[in-house]
Amino acid sequence: MDLGLRGKNAIVTGGTGSLGFAISEVLAEEGCNVIIIHRHDTEERDKMIKELSDRTGVKVKAYVCDLSSEEEVLKLFEKLDEEYDHLDVLVNNAQGGAKRGGIADTDYDDWMSAIDGIVNPVYRMCREFIRRAIEKGIHGNIVNVSAKSAEYAKHKMKIGYTACKGMINAMTKRIADDYCEQGIRVNSIMPGYIWGGFFHGDESVQKAWEAECGLRIGWATPRDLANIVAFLASDCSKQIIGVNLDTSGGTMLG
Ligand SMILES: NC(=O)c1ccc[n+]([C@@H]2O[C@H](COP(=O)([O-])OP(=O)(O)OC[C@H]3O[C@@H](n4cnc5c(N)ncnc54)[C@H](OP(=O)(O)O)[C@@H]3O)[C@@H](O)[C@H]2O)c1
């Protein structure tokens, strides 16, 4: 299926991470210019990005920005306004800052750090993207990367992460409802277990995780999820609005 993404300008936050880079790859292969946002520029990442751009022939460019900072996000969009005529797609994939533990194991700073690292980046990116889409009359597509654990508490002791992903699910529906008539679509995916990012290690570690996670069709690969994101980022999914999509491979059916 041709997703019709050729020539679109797509932002991928955390686009150098495990899932984020797979999303960047699939969008570039579909012909999108990819705008990667991350915090740390390294030689290895520069090389990955150049290789992707050379292989696909589209513009792939990374910008350093800490999405937990209001000031840095505003500066980022000033730069993007200068370099891109408009923005078509936003994938909110970056996250960080949540300490593991139950509520009794955390203090207020831990709680605020989760909100600042997981929810605030999505808030800021959606706000700036939607303001521009409305101003320019663009039909924009937003895909938020949530987590199935927001809805199904299979694993204990992740209060900050779970609560913040639940907030992203609620934001997805709210923003979708507020702006769908202006041509802005918002959905989220809720992955379960992806091998290669947070879940990684040698064979014994892998076996231990497999026993704990109760995988039913094996691990998801970053690419499995990236294909779903690309579909949601395209107008091929235009009847899907405000959906938090279970992409956990049946591991948390409840
Ligand atoms: N892995 C799983 O099994 C799983 C399951 C369910 C949901 N998810 C969700 O999938 C998404 C990606 O997870 P992942 O495991 O692929 O992550 P990852 O490999 O740890 O990559 C995270 C990316 O986000 C960037 N980032 C983090 N905080 C940032 C900030 N404040 N500003 C800008 N960039 C920031 C990182 O950039 P720097 O490295 O430069 O900081 C990095 O590029 C997350 O939303 C996660 O919750 C993952």
Image: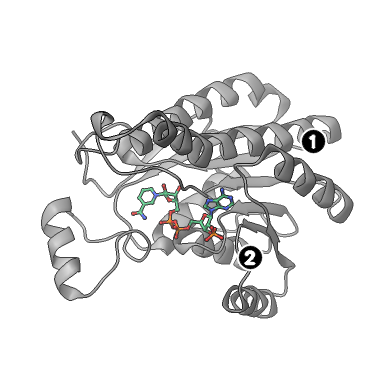
Taking depth in this image into account, of 34 and 205 the one nearest to the observer is 205
Picture colour scheme = one colour
Q: Is residue 79 above or below residue 105?
A: below
Q: Position of residue 235 (x, y in %)?
A: 62, 43
Taking depth in this image into account, of 7 and 18 the one nearest to the observer is 18
Q: Residue at x 67, y 77 (%)?
A: 50
User: How many residues crowd around disc 2 within 10 Å: few (fewer than 14), some, or many (20 or more)?
Assistant: many
Tag in front: 2 or 1: 1
> Which three-letter amino acid code belongs to the residue tagged 1?
Arg
- The answer to whether any part of residue 227 appears in the image is yes
Q: Position of residue 222 (x, y in %)?
A: 41, 62
Q: Residue at x 13, y 53 (%)?
A: 212
Q: Is residue 100 above or below residue 104?
A: below
Q: Residue at x 22, y 75 (%)?
A: 202
Q: How many marks?
A: 2
> Which three-letter amino acid code belongs to the residue tagged 2?
Ala
Asked if residue 84 lies left or right of residue 32, the reply is right
Q: Is residue 61 above or below residue 14?
A: below
Q: Where the N terminus falls, by quadrant?
A: bottom right
Q: Which mark is residue 132?
A: 1
User: How many residues crowd around disc 1 within 10 Å: few (fewer than 14), some, or many (20 or more)?
Assistant: some
Q: Where the C terminus falls, by quadrant?
A: top left
Q: Position of residue 155 (x, y in %)?
A: 20, 41
Q: Residue at x 52, y 50 (%)?
A: 94
Q: Which mark is residue 28?
A: 2
Q: Position of residue 220 (x, y in %)?
A: 32, 59
Secondary structure type for disc 2: helix
Secondary structure type for disc 1: helix
Q: Earlier in the sequence, mark 2 or mark 1?
A: 2
Taking depth in this image into account, of 249 and 163 the one nearest to the observer is 163
Please tell me in which quadrant of the rendered image residue 239 appears.
top right
- The answer to whether any part of residue 214 appears in the image is no
